Amino acid sequence: MNRHPATRPTLAVWKFASCDGCQLSLLDCEDDLLTLSEAVDIAHFTEMSTATVEGPYDISLVEGSISTPDDVRRIHEVRAQSKTLITLGACASAGGIQGLRNFAAAGSYTRSVYAHPEYIDDLATSTPIAEHVTVDFELRGCPIDKGQLLEVLLAHLARRRPLIATSSVCEECKRAGIACVLVGRGVSCLGPITHAGCGALCPSIGRGCFGCFGPSESANTNALAEQLRRVGTSDLELSRLLHTFNAAAPVFLAQYRRHADPNPEAT
Amino acid sequence: MTHRRSSRRSISVEGLSRVEGEGSLHVSIRDGEVGDVSLDIFEPPRYFEALLVGRHFSEAPDITARICGICPVAYQLTACAAMEDLCEVHVGDAVTDLRRLLYCGEWIQSHALHVYLLHAPDFLHCADAVELAERDRGAVQRGLELKRTGNLIMQTVGGRAIHPINVRVGGFFQAPDPHAIAALEEPLRRALILALDTVAWTAGFDFPDEHGDYDFVALHHDGEYAIDSGTARSTSGLDVDAAHLAGLIVEEHVERSSALHAHLAGRGDYLTGPLARFALNAGQLPPRAADAARDAGLEHECRNPFRSVVVRAVELVAACEEALRLVRHYVAPEPATAAVRARAGVGVGATEAPRGLLLHEYEVDEDGTIVRARIIPPTSQNQASIEDDLRRVVEHGLDLSDEELQWRCEQAVRNHDPCISCAAHFLDLEIQR
């Protein structure tokens, strides 16, 4: 079924390897969803609609990482059809949790999950969208924040720069007046090196940040590692924290490699 | 796209929509006989069972949540159940109740999403909820308000609607403030009314007359409509705990799919999800939901997969009622979490995800490191039954035009709200005849 071409800006949503959570954030806009559907023509959004409009599209939202040969072909098609390409979430900006395969022996993951690896056609790596095509804006998070998603969409429609903080969770936490879980209680926390955007959710409930939004700009990972060592965080624990939803993000990866010793007591 | 020859026609559609994830549907019909029928799942595999190996047991809830953005709580709480089974931890009633409230939030959110945004457009011949809103804005707003209420519970209890942050093995990081929980009562009272309206609304849809000879499997709990715990029962007489069920489920890797297909040893294919739960647990429905089911004309069990939308609506009522009860009786767990000490062994957990039974099995070493993980999501258990439904729908629909038959096939898949992201996946629909 095809809708009639529209005069409003067209929005397309594309999924690669992911959990659907970031595109669900668009449906989670709820009342704003109907308002948004009046401001833009939702031209391609498979999870939501049977109808599609042929490209090109004014804005493409891309969720997920590139992990199959077909993904590689498809992301180039999406880029060619899109004036603006915005990626959503940690899978798209850092390869996601499935990016952990990048560090495993080739084929070992497939063999451990599937009886017939020959039926599975995928790549040895799960890589960010920006490794394959030009990305106009990366929205961070695992998952993204729906308020930030609306801000990015509205900013693009108004042709202005989105108001998305590039500071750290630590700064959000301080601004919110939350007592520091790391200094005060010795809880392992990645807040000082993690990109802002969640509103310091974890520290607000007494939990340490575990890095959903990936590295912040100018993150001093060594200084944090030193501080964490002082509160008793083991190398193994720190290496796991750095090596989860944004494992392939270069800043986290470099610090991870300093701690990922098979024998944590040896360092 | 339609290709028609005298004895063999083929219809293909790029992408099955309004499902979570990507897969393909293939039906061939030659000389009026239905040949191969398959629901193929091509979602790129993400290898959770492999990447969990080497992780600390306490990380399983947050890592497995990322299997599915629609039902992260199901993954988190099933992982917790498995790890607590392994570590022999018994969380108190207050933690159990708070978890059930969180799970009700996910049921409300997920069922409202499926009923209103994914499934109802099929019955009302709309491409999507946006088109539906042009005709009946009130209906879509009802669905969105229900969904918002579910999300509100998840935010209040879990700290975030998608991939909550407050769940841990043993309980919660922090017990929500009683005032914040009390503030859920008013939205839930409204949501309960909207859920009752949803049952009446969906009961009025036109349903193709189909009957599935399913072996229904669901968790059962004598004291409540099973969501967060129970023993596994089937309409064929199975009655076992989660660990035994794990031993009975056989998963096969079939060609052209990145999902594993499950069946029960000695019993065969089975179906989990709302129809199964209703068949096995209608007696445990809370009162308003039981009344609504009766008023909607649902007998003690429903075997028409197209009417699953009504059963899902009844479960929306049940989840709202349960959530209201839990909100009114909320006692902040103190402490918010039980102490958990790692121990070597195997743990199994099972809960009722919105789409059906979800089972996790982990083997952990004495340091608390996961050495083996097995995750059996609802969609891989339902896959064979979905394919049976498709075959039946095509056999009964041979007189339909290609377009109508294709619509009905897609609808037959959506009856079971398949979560292809969970099952591992691109949905191409191809009918050859």
Image (cartoon, coloured by chain):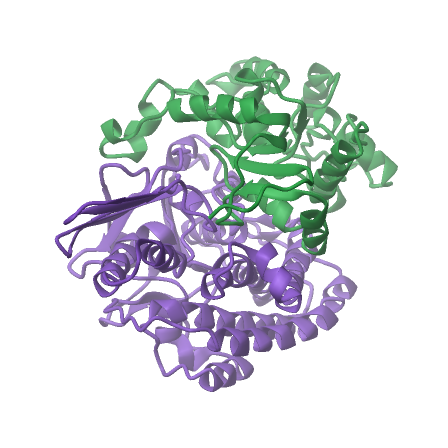
Does residue A252 sit above or below A245 in this rendering? above
Res B366 quadrant in image: top left
Image-based side of A182 in relation to A71, left or right? right
Res B408 quadrant in image: bottom left
Which quadrant of the rendered structure holds the N terminus of chain B? top left
Count of residue discs: 0
Chain rendered purple: B
Q: Residue at x 59, y 77 (%)?
A: B197
Does residue A109 sit above or below B247 in this rendering? above
Toward the viewer: A32 or B431? B431
Toward the viewer: A80 or A172? A80
Image-based side of B246 in relation to B227, left or right? left
Q: Residue at x 53, y 27 (%)?
A: A78
- Colour used to depict chain A in the structure image: green
Does residue B151 sit above or below A235 in this rendering? below
The answer to whether residue B182 of the structure is visible from this angle is yes
Res A9 quadrant in image: top right
The answer to whether residue A234 of the structure is visible from this angle is no
Toward the viewer: B388 or B180? B388
Image-based side of B379 in relation to B36, left or right? right
Q: Find residue B267 and report its horizontal and vertical position in percent.
A: 18, 61
Q: Find residue A222 and report its horizontal and vertical position in percent.
A: 69, 15
Toward the viewer: B187 or A28? A28
Q: Find residue B273 and report its horizontal and vertical position in percent.
A: 39, 63
Q: Residue at x 55, y 32 (%)?
A: A55
Q: Find residue B152 and report its horizontal and vertical position in percent.
A: 68, 58
